[in-house]
Image (cartoon, rainbow, N blue to C red):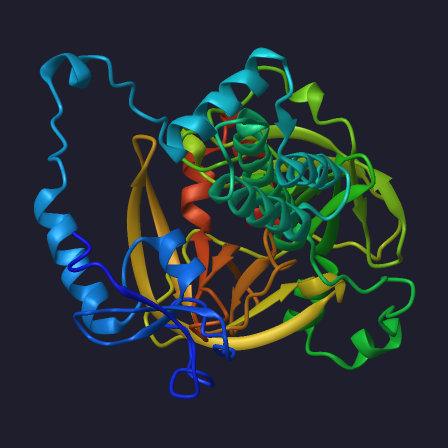
Amino acid sequence: MNGSLPRILTAGEREAGGTCAHCRMAIQYGQGVAVCNRCGELHHESCWQLKQHCGSYECAQAIRSTDSAQAASLVISRDDLNTVVPMPSRSSTASSSQDASAASGAKRWNKGSIWAFVISLIGIPLFGIVTGLVAILVACIALVGHRHNQRGLALGVLAIVIGMADVVGWAVGMSYYVGSSQTMVSLQDMAIDLESLDDLPDHLARAMRANVVVHSAVSLGRESMGSGVVLSIHDKLAYIVTNRHVVDPEYTGENSPPPDDLSTFDRIFISTLEHATLPAKVEWIAPGGVDLAILSTSVHGDGVRAARWSLDTTPHIGDKVFAIGNPHGLGWTHSSGDISQIRARSQGGYRVRILQTTAAINPGNSGGGLYDEKGQLIGVNTLTGDKRVAEGLGFSIALPTLLDLAPKRLATLTKDTEASSE
């Protein structure tokens, strides 16, 4: 393996100053020197004895090749393989540590879920449309980043549910109160000048004096307001027609049968032309969900007059008409137009005749009168088209429909007026 044995000699002038192939130190004069017989490389004698081979590059390569050829092969038996234990992977190590944490009860709460739950609860008494959306957003972020070794998954889901309830509840509540509220002007602040009625033609002045304001306290702090028309006055008791939806907050249309006990309507008041406010009683509610009602109240003085009307009056398409009512709380307002169409509908098993008019009908006009150009009452204003998408669409229930549906007792009272109102 070592090739040939070196030549051992004492360094003379020839060898002195050379470099040892092993320790790379200079060879001094008189030192023992080993000279490789294969390549002639110089070594300190002590270095050769220690290494037992030549330190030159050529001889070292040959030695390594020989050693590799003679090296023993590594043999692994089946028994050796059976005794091998695999090293744990990184994921299993992490899982073991997590399981250990779970076993020791060291699970931590998901802070995002906690915050989302708190915000959703705050949205119940506060403005839930905004806080509810914030709670939903925070909960979604928390659930996306949720880890299985954390607590709070159910809390995050609950925050989303409560947040959605906040948004829906507040949206419905606001739409109800905003949609049901009307921009009303105080009658005392915008009272009419009674002297203005003296200059009016008789047919128009009579229609003005037949108009009243109907107030109905539908809930605590909220009031519904509409119009009414005096049909007749007997022994200082005025009978007034209006819409059912003005006095009945539960009215929803055809599916609203008349209540059995009319005394439940106990918070209804009438304002007359002289601004007197009088309690009123509901005498009749139309059957079949037809939007009509008749009230009664005591009146004094000559300020209030019954409207003129006659069953012989037949309206036609194109006839000039005018409406008297209290739109947006502006009492005794006149608007004019014409009859654009005459329609009919079946409601609750009854045939209802409808007059379509271009006269301006607005919230507050409900229950007011529609008159022909001679001042004869021909209909009761009941509804209008959506002002955001349409103009000139107003509707009135024709007067014959009211008289056909009204009970005989009330119909008799109104017929007296028919004979005397001419």
Q: Which residue does the image show at 50% across and 70% down from the upper left?
A: 387
Determine the image quadrant of residue 88: top left
Q: Is 266 located above or below residue 390 in the figure?
A: above
The front one of 190 and 19 is 19
Above-or-below relation of 328 to 399: below
Percent position of residue 312, x then y: 41, 55
Q: Indicate left or right for 277 with 361 as reference.
A: right
Q: Tell me the residue at 37%/69% (across/down).
A: 43
Towards the viewer: 60 or 163: 60
Q: Residue at x 14, y 41 (%)?
A: 71
So how many labels did they put on this image?
Answer: 0
Residue 357: percent from the left, percent from the top?
Answer: 43, 69
Query: Which image quadrant: the C terminus?
Result: bottom right
Q: Is residue 231 left or right of residue 332?
A: left
Q: Residue 317's quadrant in the figure?
A: bottom left
Whether residue 238 can be seen here: yes
